[in-house]
């Protein structure tokens, strides 16, 4: 009643490949608050379904800005801090999307 063995095996191989490719990076102290902010909103991605030859794949296309604004409000982030924090998150967003583009071929 589950996925076929070959699907499970393929998923496990992709997971192991991702773990093997993971590098450890440090975060500069000046960027720590921004990194923590990103970690709290990292679930706020908008995805686009892409039909491939074998399946439908979801690709990140942007952060969900209304969700991030809601987080700013709920976290009571001072309104004066919003532009700088927004700019910081957009830098991370662009880096994540660039990394995704490097690891996703257009025909996969």
Image (tube, grey):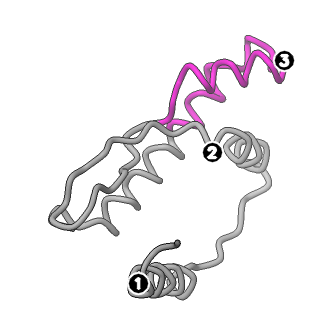
| Mark 3 residue element | loop
In the structure shown, which secondary structural element does the residue marked by tag 1 occupy?
A: helix
| Sooner in the amino-acid sequence: mark 3 or mark 1 | 1
Q: Quadrant of the C terminus?
A: bottom left
Residue drawn at point x = 52 percent, y = 79 percent: 15
Q: Is residue 42 above or below residue 5?
A: above
Which type of secondary structure does the marked residue at label 2 adopt?
A: loop
Q: Is residue 4 above or below residue 49?
A: below
Task: Point out residue 7 in the picture as x, y percentages from the top left corner.
Answer: 40, 79
**In the rendering, at what x and y percent does residue 36 appear?**
77, 46
Q: Position of residue 70 (x, y in %)?
A: 68, 19
Q: Nearer the viewer, residue 91 or 2?
A: 2
* Comparing labels 3 and 2, the label whose residue is closer to the camera: 2
Q: CA distance from mark 3 to mark 1?
A: 44 Å
Magenta segment range? Answer: 63-90
Residue 27: which quarter of the image?
bottom right
Q: Is 68 on the left-hand or right-hand side of 105?
A: right
How far apart marks 3 and 2 lie (CA) works out to 18 Å
Q: Residue furthest top?
A: 79
**Which residue corresponds to mark 1?**
10
Provide the residue designation for mark 2. 42
């Amino acid at each position: 009643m589950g996925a076929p063995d070959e699907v499970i095996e393929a998923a496990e191989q992709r997971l192991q490949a991702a773990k093997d490719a993971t590098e450890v990076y440090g975060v500069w102290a000046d960027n720590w608050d921004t990194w923590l902010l990103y970690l709290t909103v990292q679930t706020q991605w908008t995805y686009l379904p892409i039909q491939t030859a074998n399946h439908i794949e979801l690709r990140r296309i942007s952060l969900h800005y209304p969700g991030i604004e809601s987080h700013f409000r709920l976290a009571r982030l001072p309104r004066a801090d919003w532009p700088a924090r927004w700019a910081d998150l957009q830098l991370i967003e662009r880096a994540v999307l660039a990394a995704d583009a490097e690891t996703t071929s257009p025909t996969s």
